[in-house]
Amino acid sequence: MADNLIDIGKEILKQVDIVDIISSFIKVTKKGRNYVAICPFHNDTNPSLTISQEKQIFKCFTCGVGGDGITFVRRYKNCSYLDALKIVASIGGIKDERLEKKQNNVISEDLQHVYDCLDKINSYYELFLFQSDDGRNIGLKYFHDRGLTDDIIREFSLGFSPIDGEKLPERLLNDGFSLKTIEKTGIGLVYNQKIKDNNCGRVIFSIKDGEGHIVGFSARSLTNDKSIAKYVNSPETNGGVFKKSKILYNFSNAKDEARRLKFVYVVEGFMDAIAVNRAGFKNVVALMGTALTADHINLLRYLNCEVRLCLDNDNPGQDAMMKNSRLLADKGIKFRLVNNKQVVNGKDSDEILKNSGSEGLSSYLNNLISEGEFILNYYSKNMDLSQIINKKQVLINFIPFLVTVKDQLDKEIYIKQVSQLTGYSIDTINGQIKRYIERQSTKSETIDKNVSTILKSKHSMPKELNDMQLCERQILRYMLENKEAVNLYNEKLGYLPTDSYREIATLIEEYSSKNAENNYSANDIIGFVDALGEEDNIKNKDDIINTISDLSFDNNSNFPPYSKDAFVDCIYLINEKKEFRRSYQAYEENTIGKDEKDKAEQAKILLEKRKALLEKREKERNK
């Protein structure tokens, strides 16, 4: 399996830039020939992760993690090589049937039963909606009254749970699922060896993960009873798969269209997402509330497109728009917001569609503004600016945003707008900006000093490399770049003293023997190592990949460009060092308990051997 995956991985990495891969998960910034980023693999504060577009590898110079694009995804997502490869292919918009046919064997049997049971539950909910009397008279009527066609209902896997809460569990038990597995799906708890569906009598919205697997349900009550919750989401059970903070509703359906069109709408609820879809925008996801989590942001970054925030027009929704826009800005995600100054006919997308039709909703969604415009509109609508204290508060709240604006033309416009809104002069506003920056700079210097002290205590610098290790690294660097170096290694050395370096040399030899091309890159070797599985008996794979990345990035050792002479020089030096070590060990053994005269004689012999080795090396070089 590994060899085939290596070939697929090489093909895909040739089509997807590592900068695009990593920027799908974290913010990256151009710096000279390379890109830099805050390292996600340790508590980083200043960008210590470097990405080489030329070499197509990354390296953190603080914690040591490195590798290619697939390695980054595997470690960032904590997933298998195959899953990481599928994600990289998805980022590049690459469809490869060979990947679709491959399956991971890492999922436990119990977890697979949970997924299978969730799929079966979803099928029954859909069946009950269309084929049971209660489903048609209650559930289907509700969806039709909301304007949904049968095609839309099926597209979003909507359903109905029978009023008799025991009917579904009975069918699942007859299908061979255990009470324990049914309980893990979150539809109910086992009591006295029985289980009842907590969603009974409600319409069902199925919830899928990013890959389209059913992971849970949200059940909406159709009664006017205020004492019960309108929506009930699947609980996060022990052994279950539903994690609300990690899921965006409709993500699996929206992701391809979002990448194609280069934007995605983010709304609050299920019906809002369905409404936007009905208006012709397939690229829409829902938060299932107003909170935007770190995992949601990672999913949105993965789309590598503009985010368009469109939460409800009520106060909670607009407050969340303010908060969520700052979260997106802090993470470096490009976004705009639906204009909060336009007159709308409804509090959310679903109501606007109902009252104004697809054309009205489409017009509403396409009226987009920047974060700064949204903030000023928000203050002008929600604060009494006839009061001096409120004008001052607006300026205080708006200055942190102004400081983040890099484009001077944009900043000048915002300063004029806040001046008109509050009545403060442009000079006064600029003065406040300057004082704010000075205060933040002082804080930043203090924090940097504290962080530096912590990092020095937690991440001790590696010990200095001795001459032997420098030679080994030089040999490996050459072997990573040139097949001739591998042949010379086999012919003239065949062994490196340091265990970790020797293991890397062996892996390079193995890759070289399986690949006919004369030259390759460190990136190819990393891909080869990363694709190795447990059956290949590589227990320290990540350490090996980190070292290979370090070798490829190592520009501080002043290694000369590869040549046969330079490589042979390293071999001679290593052999010389090994021979001298053996001689010195012999000297120490022969002088145990001896007097100074005998020690001097043995030292003289040792020096003569050293001199002979140097002369031999010089003769070899001059041949």
Image (cartoon, helix red, strand yellow):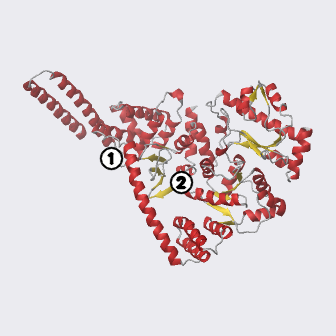
Q: Out of 132 and 255, give the one closest to the viewer.
A: 132
Residue 344 found in image quarter: bottom right
Q: Report whether residue 520 is seen.
A: no
- From the top left corner, tell me how far across and down residue 38 is, in percent: 48, 51
Q: What element carries label 2?
A: loop
Q: Which of marks 2 and 1 is nearer the N terminus?
A: 2
Give the number of the disc on residue 102: none
Instruction: Write the residue at 67% across / 67% down.
Output: 382
Q: In this view, does 481 lie above or below 432?
A: above
State the residue in front, 9 or 167.
Answer: 167
* Residue 550: % across, % down: 41, 43
Label ID, residue 557: 1
Q: Picture quarter containing residue 361?
A: bottom right
Q: Decide: is 429 above or below 171.
A: below
Query: Whole-percent x and y of residue 437?
Result: 46, 66
Secondary structure, mark 1, is: loop
Image quarter hosting the N terminus? top right
Going by the image, does 215 lie left or right of 481?
right
Nearer to me, 402 or 106: 402
Picture layout, residue 404 above or below residue 189: below
Q: Is residue 390 above or below residue 140?
A: below
Q: How crowded is mark 1: few (under 14 residues within 10 Å), some or many (20 or more)?
A: few
For disc 2, the neighbor class at 10 Å (few under 14, some 14 to 19, many from 20) is some
> Quick one: quadrant of the C terminus?
top left
- Quick check: can you spot residue 258? yes
Q: Which amino acid does label 1 sit on?
A: Ser
Q: Which amino acid does label 2 sit on?
A: Lys
Q: Name the residue under label 2.
A: 27
Q: Which of marks 2 and 1 is in front?
A: 2
